[in-house]
Each structure stands twice: as structure tokens, then as C-alpha cells.
Amino acid sequence: MIIVVSSKSKSDELKGLFNYIESHNVQIKQTIGETHTILGLVGDTVKIDMDAISTFPVVESVKRVQEPYKLVNRKFHEIDTVIDIGGFKIGGGNFSVIAGPCSVESHDQILEIARGVKQAGAGILRGGAFKPRSSPYAFQGLEGTGLMLLSEAKAATGMPLVSEVMSTDDIALFDDVDVIQVGARNMQNFRLLKELGKLDKPILLKRGLANTIEEWLMSAEYIMAGGNEKVILCERGIRTFETATRNTLDVSAIPIIKKLSHLPIIVDPSHSAGMSHLVEPLSLAAIAAGADGLIIEVHNNPQKALCDGAQSLNIPQFNALNAKIDKLVAFMKSL
Ligand code: PEP
Ligand code: MN
């Protein structure tokens, strides 16, 4: 952190600022110029509040040079984090595909899709039981029953499960779920993130609809600060001025996250696009940009889906895409 103060500041005016800084166990390196003095703070400044520094009248400006996150930061953890989900790995050169419906709708629906996507090569099954819908009149998910049906699909196929939690009240119901998803709308639900930080279970943290990469990493930091190091980031498209797609896939987030963090990053081309014909090109773009996995919505009958049918692939379409995914992942490894 760098603080600029006026060179005309009196020593008693500076004293309060110095005391405040030194109470955080960091050192101050002073460079005295003609008009301004620069204070370079050396040490761990993560817990220093820039706003509090700005309240000292002698301070002209303050700038952070170190990222505000630590546990997710690659600078303090050079090696890629690898997350094991029932034998399927994500991160550190390992690629996995998660597939399944937006929502669990019935026993037969989830079983048919689970069997279909498994046969097509997906390792992990997704399915929403608690759905964050924009309209209170839209299908809200089967909730606890949906989780039970997912468990039946897991028992029948052996596939580990990914499902979204929306409230701290429901976490106890997710015992048999292998990866708990935090949806885009809950990326900054800090109480939820803190509770998930207490678990020993991977958390799939989707990027918020209009959140910066730094805000997203700070949310991951919340989970890690609670002691849960198993965080998978998921880029799912962000809100932009463009209306031709449901969201705009931020492909550049993939290499940026890789540079800033050791956490794995996967891509959700379905919510990025909002249209099934875009799922293939966006999936392939994500792999080429270095993603560690994909989460793709697949339905046995997209026309009849209770949620997100327009962006869902049917099982034969997913099968064809997965063959291309395998080839491109192998090609990327060969480069
Ligand atoms: C979902 O995965 O079905 C979902 C609601 O995703 P998002 O939170 O990214 O909108
Ligand atoms: Mn969906």
C-alpha cells in the first residue's frame, strides 16, 4: 500500500497515522520529496482498511499495490489447486465435464438424463433442486424432493452430484451432494459464503451477474477464510450492453484468474449464451482459453423443460459435443 501525504504535514499530524499503520504490524518506508512524502507500507496489508487511512486529514491519496485477497492469491500459493470430486479431478491440468438439467423435475427425467450424460462421457451430474427464478410464479424447483431424486440418480449411476444451495437454512439437506453450487445471484451472500467455509466439501462459486474479477475472488476468499480450501470458480457470463446473448461470456476471465489465483476455473456456456446453438462454440473457446472444466445444461426433452430449455442441449447433441471436447482437451495438452 502506498500513502501520499503532504511534505508540509507536521510531525504531530503524522503521528496518529503512523500509530494506526504500525498497529497492523507493517513497516513504513518514507520517501520525502519536495512537495509530497510517500509512505510505502511493507508487510501484510490485507487487513488495513483504505477508507480508514483516508480519514486522516494528512492523507492526500492511498493506493493498494497488493491484492486485497491472500488465501486465493497465487503469489502465496504457486501450485494449482486440484479438486477431486469422487475421482474426477478439476484443476492442475485435469479437466472434467459436469452435465445435467437446469432443474430436477421428476424421477424419470433425472435418471434418463444422468444415464444419457454418463454414457456420453460426463463425469459429474448437475441438477438444481432450489432454483433462483426471476419470477416468483416460475417453477421454483422440487427442493428437498429434488435432492432426494438426485441421490437416487447418484445411486443408480455412481455419478457425483453438483447442486445449488440458496440459503444457509438448507445446507444440512446437502449431505449427499458432492459439490455445492453458489449461484450468480448469491455470489455476495456473505453469510452463506461464511457457512460454506465451515464445510469440508467443494464449493462451485459462480461469478455474479455484474461482478468484477476482484469481487469474485474476494467471495472465494470468504469461503477459504472459513477453512474450506476447496473452491472451484465458474465463469457464467456477465451482464453487458449486448442483448444478442443472455449474458456475455468473459473469456478473458479464464487466463486472468489463472494468473491471479491457484483455484481452478470452469465455464458454464449454457447460462453465458442462453441459446443451445452457442453452447458448442463457447465450450470450445473456454477450453482453448485454459478452462479446467465445463458445466453444461442437458435435458432429455428441452422443449418441455421447466427451466432454461432454450439453452439446454438434448442428449444426442451433448454426446456429439463431448466427443469434440475430448479431442480439444487432448490437443491442448499436446501443445
Ligand atoms: C444454474 O446453474 O442453473 C443457475 C441458476 O446458474 P446462475 O447462478 O449462473 O444463473
Ligand atoms: Mn439454469
Image (tube, helix red, strand yellow):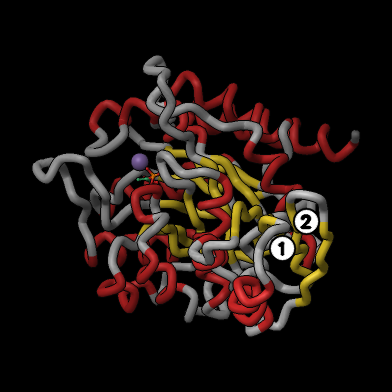
Q: Is residue 62 above or below residue 77?
A: above
Q: Residue at x 25, y 74 (%)?
A: 169
Location of ligand 1 given as a quarter of the image: top left
Q: Quadrant for residue 290, please give it.
A: top right
Q: Residue at x 12, y 45 (%)?
A: 136
The x and y percentages for residue 241 are 41, 20
The x and y percentages for residue 300 are 36, 36
Task: Give whichever of 177, 205 is nearer the camera.
Answer: 205
Residue 305 got which mark?
Answer: none
The x and y percentages for residue 72 are 66, 63
Residue 82 got which mark?
Answer: 1
Residue 163 is left or right of residue 148, and the answer is: right
Using the rendered image of the protein, determine whether residue 323 is visible from the camera's viewpoint.
Answer: no
Q: Quadrant of the N terminus?
A: bottom right
Pointer 2 residue:
92
Q: Quadrant for residue 190, please give it.
A: bottom left
Outermost residue on the left side: it is: 137
| Disc 1 residue: CB within 8 Å of ligand 1 | no
The x and y percentages for residue 223 are 52, 70
Marks counted in the figure total 2
Task: Give whichever of 322, 225 is nearer the camera.
Answer: 225
Assess disc 1: are there few (<14), some (14-19) or many (≥20) residues with their C-alpha within 10 Å of its C-alpha: some
Type of the residue with mark 2: Gly
Q: Is residue 98 above or below residue 87?
A: above
Q: Secondary structure at mark 1?
A: loop
Using the rendered image of the protein, determine whether residue 10 is visible from the camera's viewpoint.
Answer: yes
Q: Secondary structure at mark 2?
A: loop
Q: Residue at x 22, y 61 (%)?
A: 143
Q: Is residue 142 above or below residue 70?
A: above
